[in-house]
Structures are given as C-alpha cells and as structure tokens.
C-alpha cells in the first residue's frame, strides 16, 4: 500500500509504481466519476451541479510525466493500492491539518473541543463518523422513512388475506384464531434499521458519545430512530447491510440516499479498507472553494449577511427594475447571486490566493453587483497565509470602496484548542463588517 501526501494547489513528484493507478483519476472531471460506478467515493458538496462554480467540472488531480498537480480539491482518495492524501495548503510540516478539520467542524456543526484531532490514516474514517449527525438531521427533516411491509398475524381480527397453509399448520384444532397477512406502512424497515445499526456502532467508538450527543437536535433524531426500530437485533447487522445495497430512489425521502450511503460506508469500514475492488475509486473529497464559502457563512450570517443559492434560484437580486425586462433581455433572467450580501455591502468568497491582486473577471463581477444594488462597499475575503490584512481601494465613477480582506489562518500552534482560539480572533475582522 502506497500513501502519497500533497497539499491543495501544489505540485509533487509521483513514484513510477503509482502512475498506473493515478491515471485512473488524473484529468477526469469529478462529475464524470459516476457515484454509481464508484459507490465508495463521497464528494462534498453532494449536489455537484447546484453551485455556480461548476464543481463537477473540477479534476481531483492532473498529471504530466512524473508530476501531479492539485487544485482546490482536498481529502482522501484511493485507487487500487495507491492512496492520495490531499491536505489544505495550510497544513503544518508535520502533517497536522488543523485548518481542514476546523472548517469541517464549523460547517458540519461538530463539537470543536471534545472530538480528538488526529493525523493517522484513520482520519478518513473519523470524517465519516463526524458527518453522520449532519446527514441524520438532514434526512429526519423530511420525516421518518416509511415503506410498505408485509406482516403476518394469527388472531381473530382478520384484516387481510388468509394464509391457508399457515392457518392449517398453526390453528388445527381450531381455537378461534385465523392466520392472515397484511401490507402496512411501517417506520421499522431496512432503512431505519440501517441507521439504528450505525448509531449503535458509533456508540462503541472512543468519541461516539460526543458525536451522538453533540446537540439537542441530534439527540432528538436518535431518539426517533430508536423508538421506530423496536425489532433491532445486533446479530442481524450483515442482513440489514445486504438489504440496503440497492440505493434508495424515493422522490420525497431524497435525503435518505446520502444517509444510506454514509451508513454503509461506516458499517463496512473494515471491508472497504482491506478489500478494495480493482480500479474502483474510493475516499472522501471536499471542494476547498465550497468549504471555504460555507465556513464563511457560519460567521457572516451573524453579521446580517445573506447567502444566496444560485442553482436553487433563491435569494438572488434583480439586475433590472422590472421583472419583465429581465426576461426580455435574456432568457436566463439576469438575477444576481453574490456569495454574500446585505444592505450596502457585497462580498465574494475566494479560496485562491489574492496577495498578487484580483482577477479581472472577479473584479468586474463584484463592481457590477455593487452598481446594481447601489452598494458603497464590496470586496473579497480570502484565507491569508501570512497576516491579517485589509486593503481598501476607492472606485472611480460612482464611487465606493473595494475591500480586499485577508483572514489570517492560524499556524504554529501545537494544540487544536489553541488553534481554535487564534482562529476566533482572526474571524473578528469580518464579524465587524
């Protein structure tokens, strides 16, 4: 087993023995890595086509000769016996990647202090455990999963077709009971059983109690699952897993598809670790630009900023005064979807380095948003590798201020709690916007 460690937006030499495996993912768009063909690959955000940055068009890596280069994708990915660990570019020399863990914990509402941070290869499995409450709450927000099940009864209250063979076998001589079966909606089914088995499995882990008791909503969801799965039997775990190998395709309980996949990944951890199928891609990947944007949202929403959803057409701003004019000039309707906005302020999240200036297209976009909304303030927020810094530029024409805000990413600390404290101090600069 070969492990290659690299950071995002960087280059690295590749051993000849790993080239063949890495070619399976090199220069291939994430959207083309079918999750049906590679069920053990988790990519975040889950809806690849929802975001304006076209995450599905990104490649995990590119390879030229004996060198690979990375973009904004971070996480862990493996093919055959080659494993690639892509850390954030803010990871320390000893491999500690506090920044990636910190953003994940903020975005997925994980307890920042009680969950131990590690750098072992088991990190990839820890990610799955940490993400479970997020997927559980998202699925339960659609209600408890229910489906038709066949139940067999043997009593005098006949509510379905009589099972003649079973009736003769069980009720001769006749004592007043009749064997029959019904088809009823039930919350106790293979899907909720899978979730229950996952909950009980996580309880056995070192930090399982912390994960499952992280907040009142998580505890409420676990109670609902526990009450719905009265037939739970730990010895039937493999049976339940096999019943869930076919993905859920339900128009209403759509969030359960991701939860089902995650539960299978957790419960089948050992077999996934030691018995990968040939040429299949497996792992957990995060788009750095998406993660940075969602992390900023946890901070900026406290200051009144809104976070529009481009692909869902929610929270957008109008470019023209009249809605009819929007449709006349463009069939796509000229709605504006800045990353963040509030009265008199437009902000764009950039995971890329901005030390050497802003790209022309990005600059023009923010200026056009400022003009359309009559905002006097606009700008960019990016993670800074050096210092906490804000540079202000005064626009000509109608005026206004362009802010280039570098949020300093903490480094040089050996303890994760100290890291969190330093990040909280860095965040104060944008909490005051």
Image (cartoon, helix red, strand yellow):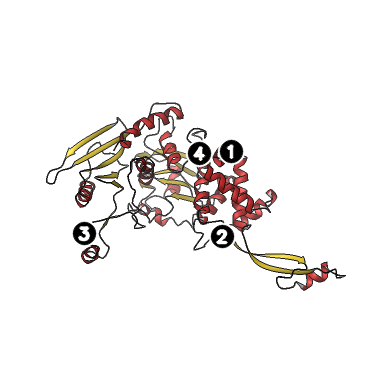
Residue 149 spot, x, y in % from top left: 64, 64
Q: Residue at x 56, y 44 (%)?
A: 219
Residue nearer the viewer, 368 or 215: 215
Residue nearer the viewer, 70 or 180: 180
The mark nearer the N terminus, 4 or 1, is 4
Kindly identify which numbered label has been placed on residue 246: 2
Image depth: mark 3 or mark 4 in front? 3
Check contact, mark 1 vs mark 2: CB within 8 A.
no
Check contact, mark 3 vs mark 4: CB within 8 A.
no
Look at the image and tell me in which quarter the C terminus lies. top left
Quadrant of the image occupied by residue 167: bottom right
Residue 79 spot, x, y in % from top left: 48, 48
Q: Residue at x 25, y 34 (%)?
A: 390
Residue 382, above or below 415: below
The mark nearer the N terminus, 3 or 4, is 4
Q: Residue furthest right?
A: 173
Residue with the mark numbered 4 = 123
Categorize mark 3 by other alpha carbons within 10 Å: few (<14), some (14-19), many (20+).
few
Categorize mark 1 by other alpha carbons within 10 Å: few (<14), some (14-19), many (20+).
few
């Amino acid at each position: 087993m070969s492990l290659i460690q690299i950071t995002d937006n960087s280059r690295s030499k590749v051993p000849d023995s790993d080239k063949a495996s890495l070619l399976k993912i090199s220069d291939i768009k994430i959207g083309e890595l079918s999750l049906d063909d590679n069920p053990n690959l988790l990519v975040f955000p889950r809806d690849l086509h929802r975001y304006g940055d076209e995450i599905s068009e990104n490649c995990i890596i590119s390879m030229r000769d004996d060198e690979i280069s990375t973009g904004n994708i971070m996480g862990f990915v493996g093919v055959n016996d080659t494993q690639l660990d892509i850390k954030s570019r803010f990871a320390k020399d000893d491999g500690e990647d506090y920044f990636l863990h910190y953003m994940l914990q903020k975005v997925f509402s994980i307890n920042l202090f009680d969950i131990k941070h590690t750098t072992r290869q088991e990190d990839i499995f820890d990610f799955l455990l940490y993400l479970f409450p997020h997927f559980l709450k998202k699925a339960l927000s659609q209600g408890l999963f229910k489906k038709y099940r066949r139940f067999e009864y043997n009593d005098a209250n006949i509510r379905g077709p009589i099972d003649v063979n079973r009736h003769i076998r069980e009720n001769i001589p006749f004592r007043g009971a009749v064997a029959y079966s019904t088809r009823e909606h039930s919350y106790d089914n293979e899907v909720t059983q899978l979730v229950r088995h996952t909950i009980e499995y996580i309880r056995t882990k070192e930090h399982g109690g912390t994960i499952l008791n992280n907040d009142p909503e998580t505890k409420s969801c676990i109670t609902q699952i526990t009450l719905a799965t009265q037939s739970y039997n730990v010895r039937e775990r493999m049976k339940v897993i096999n019943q869930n190998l076919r993905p859920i395709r339900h128009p209403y309980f759509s969030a359960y598809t991701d939860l089902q996949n995650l539960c299978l990944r957790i419960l089948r951890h050992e077999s996934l670790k030691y018995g990968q199928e040939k040429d299949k891609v497996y792992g957990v990947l995060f788009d750095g630009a998406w993660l940075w944007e969602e992390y900023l949202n946890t901070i900026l929403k406290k200051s009144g900023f809104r976070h529009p959803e481009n692909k869902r057409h929610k929270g957008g701003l109008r470019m023209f005064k009249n809605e009819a004019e929007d449709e006349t000039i463009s069939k796509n309707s000229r709605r504006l979807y800045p990353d963040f906005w509030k009265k008199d302020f437009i902000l764009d999240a950039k995971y890329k380095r901005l030390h050497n200036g802003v790209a022309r297209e990005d600059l023009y976009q923010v200026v056009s948003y400022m003009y359309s909304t009559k905002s006097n303030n606009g700008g960019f927020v990016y993670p800074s590798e050096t210092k906490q810094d804000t540079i202000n530029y005064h626009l000509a024409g109608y005026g206004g201020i362009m802010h280039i805000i570098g949020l300093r990413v903490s480094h040089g600390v050996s303890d994760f709690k100290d890291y969190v404290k330093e990040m909280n101090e860095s965040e104060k600069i944008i909490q005051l916007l």
